[in-house]
Amino acid sequence: ITRHGQFVFQRRTGTAFVRQESAGKLVKQISDKVKEAIEKIIKKKSWIDAATQMEALEKVRYMRSMIGYPNWVKNKLKVQQLFKHVNSFKLKMSYTEISMHLISNNLRVNCEKIHLPVQPDEEWDKDFAAVNGQYKPQTNSFALYAGLIQEPLYIQGVPVAVNVGSVGWFSGHELTHAFDTIGSRYDSTGRYRDWWSEAVRRSFEVQADCFRDQYSKIYDSEAKKHLRGVHTKVENIADNGGIRAAVKALKAILKETPAADVKLPGLEQYSSRQLLFISFANSLCSKYTTRARKQYIEVNSHSLPEYRVNVSLQNCNAFRKAFQCAPGSPMAPNNK
């Protein structure tokens, strides 16, 4: 019922939600810096030939960002137009009756758009109040929805490093999907086309298989199961790419705005870079029962949150340097 309600009422509930929550300029600035970081990472990949690199950079530059909510949300007239076919509700109406009224209205509004020009900035196919984000290869666009850009993931008034570690990592995660085993099959316009050279594709698959093998070796003692590296490979790649992009984004932000390099009250012992990693870990902090852990491993396309954090950081040289991890220690293994 909850999911059905979210589907039926999403435009109305989303509108009410956004009136209370604002994505803010900082989120857009962070996501833009993460995009720039992705470009820098692409340029430094020696295994990517010039032609493929050029198309990859073009894909990043043409990528459309959808941050928070669509433009029509703050326009009362447009909101009213979205519900113009809804009759007034009565207190005695059942949930089913209300749902049917809204479904009928939505169908009529959508049918009226047939033959009209597509307005991608106005038409979002997800509930923007959802605590989620996504990358869509068919439109070469990524979204951070308003429901996601709130505490504890996005916090007003804290050092920028904290939000880069959470929102910035999330942006990097979604942007990395543009170049994973699925996203790499779509070009900058969203057209299904294999624009990678054969050599680049082979090199990528070899590295992707390394992630597969690394995660597959992990045995969760509580669930008594190995992680499914084959099934989580795409998301694991995005996790690792996301944290690297976030690190580069923070470096660029602090270089441009040195005054942003401030301490977090109560945690003054940590540097900005350390705060980024702490915030990243905190954004995925969770607790599961043994039964839930087993089910998560069996069906989820992501690794368990603790492995999403720990393995990504074990693979991140910037983390080792930030916390001075000794070679061979748990977070700085010699063999990754």
Image (cartoon, grey):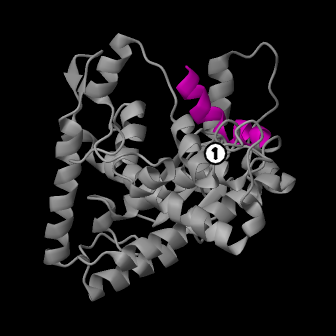
Q: Mark 1 points at which residue?
A: 270
> Would residue 295 appear left or right of 247 to someone viewing this image?
left
How many labels were placed on the picture?
A: 1
Q: Main secondary structure of the magenta part?
A: helix
* Left or right placement of residue 271 versus residue 306 in this view: right
Q: Residue furthest bottom?
A: 50
Answer with left or right where residue 244 lies relative to residue 75.
left
Residue 253 picture location, percent across and down: 65, 67
Magenta stretch: includes residue 231: no
Where is 101 relative to 178, above or below? above
Residue 3 is covered by the magenta coloring: yes
- Give the vertical position of 137 relative to 222 (above or below): below
Q: Measured from the top left, where is residue 203 in percent x and y?
A: 17, 68
Q: In this view, does 287 lie above or below 69?
A: above
Q: Which of 236 and 219 is in front in this view?
A: 219
At a point 40% along the width and 70% down the height, the residue shown is 190
- Quadrant including the N terminus: top right
Residue at the (35%, 12%) spot, across then down: 290
**Picture coordinates of residue 114 (x, y %)?**
56, 62
Relative to the observer, which residue lies in front, 93 or 186? 186
User: Could you tell me if residue 183 is visible in this image?
Assistant: yes
Q: Can residue 189 be seen in this view?
A: no
Q: In front here: 285 or 126? A: 285
Q: What stretch is highlighted in magenta?
A: 1-17
Q: Residue at x 61, y 58 (%)?
A: 123
Q: Tell me residue 218's x, y (percent).
A: 23, 32
Residue 264 is drawn in which quadrant? Answer: top right
Q: Which of 26 and 131 is in front in this view?
A: 26
Q: Residue 17 is drawn in which quadrant? A: top right
Quadrant of the rendered image containing residue 309? top left
Q: What residue type is labelled 1?
A: Tyr
